[in-house]
């Protein structure tokens, strides 16, 4: 019996000692403490999840795909105006269709081209209005998503002001994209011209350096676009310095994403059915993953040590001292006097009764 009691006592002391010792960090927690980039990645992923990144990405993707219809109408309208002003191009287009498509399809496509030329004005107006509607919706959802990743309190500006600002931002982003791609293309063409002028157009190392230059220019263009998107598209602008490092991650990651999607489209469009719906599916997948990537990069910028803000702690209100007055109900003066009188009479009568019992 003594031995079992001693063992129980040792078990109790062992459990008490185990409870007093702090819990040891896991291997993953040790890795996070050792590698700052891993801890930053985990914090960015947690913020992306907490701020409903996938839901916002789905909304942005929806408006991205929806905007294809008016953009296609605009393209048909522009093509109609070009073919109307340049009849020789229409002849070349019809000859190209007849040469590259089966005989039956050529007769079906020619009326479509003729309708596009005839209804170019109507197609242009409908396409422009639709593009404005879907473009503003896309920009509004993107700005709300970026603002949520920065932890900004949702605001409800007036509808007219919000629509105007989103339209101006959409135009600015479009100009930035066109400018960046134009700079990249012009720089590459200029480099090819220079190589041809100095007689190095056929040299392998010169062609390799030209390819490297194209990649570098593409990364620089992507960095500028991501810098502007992360810092200037949210409802409340952030500083460019706070988004500079995250924009580097965005530029490199977006270039890799484009390469992966190019391989994906090549695989999907191998079959005849893939050639029919593969580009649409590829665009849908690319828009979704690009939206998720942009929001994750924004969460990365928001969770940087220089930008991360501590959650505000509510300050308790000032202490208020209240004086409490307790009122107890009791008999008034007349009632008290009456009770005392009754008590005195009862005492006298009780005393006489006691005296009478003692006399015999």
Image: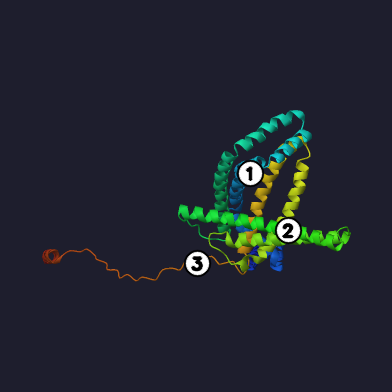
Report x, y in % for residue 298: 62, 60
The answer for how far apart the CA atoms under marks 2 and 3 are is 53 Å
Choose the circle earlier in sequence order: 2 or 1.
1
Q: Residue furthest top?
A: 104
Using the image as rendered, state which of residue 296 and residue 314 is in the foreground.
296
User: Regarding mark 3 in the picture, which secondary structure is present there?
Assistant: loop
Seen in the picture, residue 72 relative to 258 is either above or below; the reply is: above
Using the image as rendered, state which of residue 73 and residue 218 is in the foreground.
73
Q: Quadrant of residue 320?
A: bottom left
Q: Residue furthest right?
A: 203
The answer for how far apart the CA atoms under marks 1 and 3 are is 57 Å
User: Regarding mark 2 in the picture, which secondary structure is present there?
Assistant: helix
User: In the visual, does 297 lie left or right of 188?
Assistant: left
Label 1 or label 3, whichever lies nearer to me, is 1
Residue beneath disc 2: 186
User: Regarding mark 1 in the picture, which secondary structure is present there?
Assistant: helix
Q: Which mark is residue 26?
A: none
Q: Quadrant of residue 198?
A: bottom right
Task: Locate the N terminus by quadrant.
Answer: bottom right
Q: Please count the marks in the image.
A: 3
Residue beneath disc 1: 78
Circles 1, 3 touching at the beta carbon (< 8 Å): no
Circles 2, 1 touching at the beta carbon (< 8 Å): no
Q: Residues within 10 Å of mark 3 (few under 14, many from 20)?
A: few
Report x, y in % for residue 343: 14, 65
Report x, y in % for residue 277: 70, 38
Residue beneath disc 3: 313
Q: Residues within 10 Å of mark 1 (few under 14, many from 20)?
A: some
Q: Quadrant of residue 299?
A: bottom right
Task: Locate the C terminus by quadrant.
Answer: bottom left
Choose the circle earlier in sequence order: 2 or 3.
2
User: In the visual, does 234 lie left or right of 262?
Assistant: left
């Amino acid at each position: 019996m003594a031995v079992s009691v001693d063992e129980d006592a040792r078990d109790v002391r062992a459990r008490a000692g185990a409870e007093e010792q702090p819990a040891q960090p896991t291997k993953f927690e040790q890795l996070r403490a050792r590698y700052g980039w891993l801890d930053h990645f985990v914090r960015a992923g947690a913020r992306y999840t907490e701020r409903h990144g996938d839901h916002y990405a789905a909304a942005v993707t929806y408006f991205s795909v929806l905007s294809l219809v008016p953009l296609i109408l605009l393209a048909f309208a522009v093509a109609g105006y070009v073919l109307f002003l340049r009849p020789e191009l229409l002849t070349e287009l019809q000859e190209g269709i007849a040469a590259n498509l089966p005989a039956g399809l050529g007769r079906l496509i020619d009326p479509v081209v003729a309708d596009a030329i005839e209804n170019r004005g109507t197609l242009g107006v409908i396409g422009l209005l639709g593009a404005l509607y879907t473009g503003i919706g896309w920009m509004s959802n993107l700005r709300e998503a970026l603002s949520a990743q920065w932890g900004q309190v949702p605001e409800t500006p007036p509808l007219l002001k919000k629509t105007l600002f989103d339209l101006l931002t959409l135009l600015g982003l479009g100009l930035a994209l066109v400018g960046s791609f134009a700079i990249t293309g012009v720089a590459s063409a200029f480099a090819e011209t220079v190589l041809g002028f100095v007689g190095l157009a056929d040299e392998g190392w010169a062609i390799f350096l030209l390819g490297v230059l194209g990649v570098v220019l593409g990364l620089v263009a992507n960095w500028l676009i991501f810098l502007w998107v992360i810092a200037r598209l949210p409802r409340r602008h952030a500083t460019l310095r706070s988004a500079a490092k995250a924009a580097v991650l965005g530029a490199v990651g977006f270039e890799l994403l484009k390469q992966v999607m190019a391989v994906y489209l090549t695989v999907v469009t191998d079959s005849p059915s893939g050639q029919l719906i593969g580009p649409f599916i590829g665009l849908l997948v690319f828009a979704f993953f690009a939206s998720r990537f942009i929001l994750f990069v924004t969460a990365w910028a928001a969770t940087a040590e220089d930008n991360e803000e501590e959650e505000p702690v509510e300050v308790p209100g000032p202490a208020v001292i209240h004086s409490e007055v307790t009122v107890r109900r009791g008999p008034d003066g007349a009632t008290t006097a009456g009770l005392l009188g009754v008590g005195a009479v009862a005492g006298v009568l009780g005393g006489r009764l006691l005296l009478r019992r003692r006399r015999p």
